[in-house]
Amino acid sequence: MMEEVDGQVIGEKVVKVLKSIFDPEIPVDIYELGLIYDVMVSSDADVKILMTLTSPNCPVAETLPLEVEEKVKSLKEVNDAEVEITFDPPWNKDLMSEEAKLELGML
């Protein structure tokens, strides 16, 4: 019998992984930067991450989503991971956490 998937536990582990991935241009992780719009965990432990980039021509537009996918897939609780990039709504500084703003001297 398969173990029931605990989406909340998986979601928290995914967030922990996301907090270990940094934007190369800004010394803040992508989660605190507000680049992650949504983390969805299915009953099959498939994770879908809806994220944005600081700009459409961000130098890591190609590599960052792949890095996110690979790191999330490496969690043993995760069956599969998919990253979807969106620019709707476009990212802006208001999406950053207080912590990120403090880090960047914006508070």
Image (cartoon, helix red, strand yellow):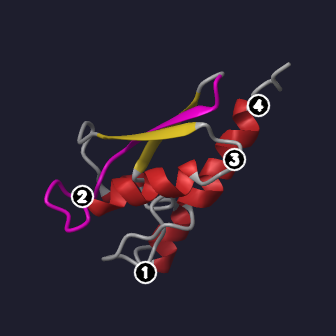
Q: Which residue is drawn at 60% across and 25% down?
A: 42
Of tags 4 and 3, the one toward the viewer is 4
Per the rendering, the mark at residue 12 is: 3
State the CA–CA distance, disc 2 to disc 1: 28 Å
Q: In which quarter of the image is the N terminus?
A: top right
Point 56% across, 68% down: residue: 20
Residue on which disc 2 sits:
62
Q: What stretch is highlighted in magenta?
A: 44-62
Residue 105 numbered tag: 1
Q: Relative to 49, is 43 on the left or the right?
A: right
Rendered-image quadrant of the C terminus = bottom left
Q: Quadrant of residue 57?
A: bottom left
Secondary structure under the numbered disc 2 in the rendered image: loop
Tag 4 residue: 6
Q: Of helix, strand and loop, which one carries label 1?
A: loop
Above or below, comparing residue 7 to residue 64 in the picture: above
Real-space CA distance between mark 1 and mark 3, rounded to the nearest whole angstrom: 28 Å
Q: Callout 1, which amino acid?
A: Gly
Please tell me which residue is depicted at 34% across the width and 76% down the height of the picture.
24
Estimate the spatial distance between the alpha carbons at disc 2 and disc 4, rounded to whole Å: 31 Å
